[in-house]
Image: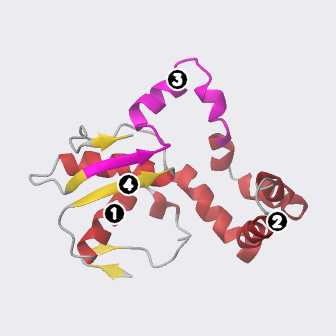
Amino acid sequence: LLLGPVSIRHQARPPALEDYAVDRLVDDVFGFADALGVERFHLVGHDWGGFVAWYAAARDSQQAEPRLRSLTVVSTPHPVPFRAAMHSGGDQRERSSYMEWFRSADAEAGWLADDGALLTAAYAEHPADAREEYRRVFTADDGAALTGGLNWYRANTFHPPDGAITAPTLY
């Protein structure tokens, strides 16, 4: 799907690792707004969407005419304090240790081993039909959806965004 000058990947789960790099994802944020004909907008992000939103807001603040009316991020701290917490000697590094495994070349094999036993366990608290649907999606096409999800971790670190955030922000 081509949206103006920005190429929004036409696949829900593009196979190339570089398609998950934060700069390309930020391009997509503004590309969607352009395609919708929206000059100024409120940006809300959750989880990895929140991660992308911090970088989008930092890029936006460097523009002569910023486009963000406001920024709201749910459950994802700003990358700078998050990175500091990872290296502070506190427990954040341990709490986030799963990220290193998700970035490893062995992650898919681990999730898919024993007929997706780890996937089933990860969704154990979900209703049975939802659990089965997650398992079905993540194991289909040799785990393409699983690789897509893991590529968010592989392509991104929590490096400081360029620029301060000037949009009114709620975290």
Badge number at residue 44: 4
Q: Earlier in the sequence, mark 3 or mark 1?
A: 1
Badge number at residue 87: 3
Q: Earlier in the sequence, mark 1 or mark 2?
A: 1
Note whether 28 is above or below 35 in the view shown. above
Question: Magenta residues, as a range?
Answer: 70-98
Question: Which residue appears at 44% of the width and 56% of the height?
Answer: 21
Q: Amino acid at mark 4?
A: Val
Question: Which residue appears at 47% of the width and 52% of the height?
Answer: 46
Viewer-side label of 3, 1: 1
| Residue at mark 2 | 128
Question: Which residue appears at 21% of the width and 75% of the height?
Answer: 37
Q: Counting other residues with Cα less than 10 Å from the Cα at mark 2, is it few (<14), some (14-19), or many (20 or more)?
A: few
| Residue at mark 1 | 29
Q: Earlier in the sequence, mark 4 or mark 2?
A: 4
> What element does badge 3 sit on?
loop
Viewer-side label of 2, 3: 2
Viewer-side label of 3, 4: 4
Distance from disc 3 to disc 1, alpha carbons, whole Å, reads 30 Å
